[in-house]
Amino acid sequence: MTNTAVQSAQNQTGERSRQTHRYLMCRPDHFTVSYRINPWMEPARPTDTALAVRQWQVLYDTYRALGHEVQLIDPVPGLPDMVYTANGGFTLDGIAYGARFRFAERAPEAEYFDEWFAAHGFEVVKPSQVNEGEGDFLLAGDVILGGTGFRSSGESHREVAEVFGREVLSLNLVEPRFYHLDTALTVLDPVVEAGDTAGIAYLPSAFDEASRGVLAERFPDAIQVGPDDGAVFGLNSASDGYNVLVSPRATGFAAQLRERGYHPVTVDLHELLLGGGGIKCCTLELRGAAG
Ligand code: ARG
């Protein structure tokens, strides 16, 4: 974490304003790649758990230094993907809509996350539809963006719309490397005034034509990110409205962010990319329900 990052968080400059967020993370103590459920995972390739923990710790420390609150869920032996807490559910207004994982390898995680939400004051809604939490559901102002095509089902979008009483805009993912919405799209302004459009950035080629049309219509000012930045998981980033935590490899995206008045803060999670996840995957936003 650089001094400038800390400073900027403390003395807000420019037009962009940051908000304080509450996140849920899980230390990758049991991180490894022992199965393959996305194209990034190669079980034959060795992983370095200690390195994964060190890189994860930098992400944790960076959030804290920027003034955010980070809560932790205990890692469970035998569930190496639990570090990707974004998939543990979707929270809003004190309600936690639980996950129902597409693959058997991750299915047992759901219960641990549901227990954590209940123990921390959330009303837990058990899903009847397959969905992978904030990996595929992103809040952008008044609207929830829902990804489908690889993991979360289209039916889960309807369920989320009902549970939260919000509009869900369904987006179809078509590129296997970008199998969750949060690998192809990031929300830059998590909180906006009622009726305002949130800033977002996305990788157009990860979506089908119809979804590209929806994005262009609803988010005409969005940043369109190039394939090189997309391929290094540049879009798997987390923003507090000003500071945007982003992979150091996504240099083009970082420049686009600066042009728009955001402040990119780089965090390198390349070891966790061996499991197909990055900054956002390791971060679940907690909205509502006190600590
Ligand atoms: N290995 C995990 C999986 O395939 C990675 C999950 C990444 N999470 C995310 N929110 N994109 O499910």
Image (tube, rainbow, N blue to C red):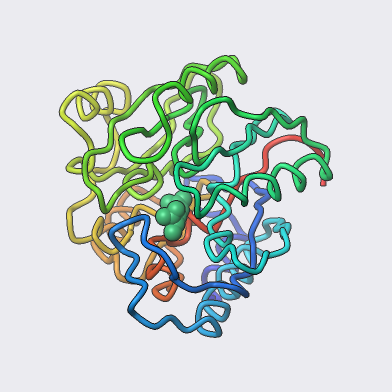
Q: In the displayed image of the protein, which residue is found farthest to the front?
A: 104
Is residue 237 among the parts visible in the rendering? no
Measured as percent of width and height from the top left, residue 213 is found at 20, 24
Measured as percent of width and height from the top left, residue 67 is found at 68, 59
In the displayed structure, does residue 164 sit left or right of residue 161? Answer: right
Which residue shows up at 48% across the image and 35% down it? 137
Which residue shows up at 29% across the image and 43% down it? 202
In the displayed structure, does residue 8 sit left or right of residue 44? Answer: right
Measured as percent of width and height from the top left, residue 229 is found at 24, 59
Q: Nearer the viewer, residue 275 or 229?
A: 275
Height in image: 157 above or below 12? Answer: above
Q: Nearer the viewer, residue 188 or 42?
A: 42
In the displayed structure, does residue 116 sit left or right of residue 223? Answer: right
Q: Nearer the viewer, residue 224 or 28?
A: 28
Height in image: 47 above or below 180? Answer: below
Which residue shows up at 53% across the image and 57% down it? 84
Quarter that holds the N terminus: bottom right
Measured as percent of width and height from the top left, residue 45 is found at 34, 79
In the displayed structure, does residue 213 sit left or right of residue 1? Answer: left
Is residue 65 among the parts visible in the rendering? yes
Quadrant where ligand 1 appears:
bottom left
Displayed quadrant of residue 42: bottom left
Which residue shows up at 72% across the image and 58% down it? 73
Count of residue discs:
0
Height in image: 145 above or below 67? Answer: above
Height in image: 209 above or below 270? Answer: above
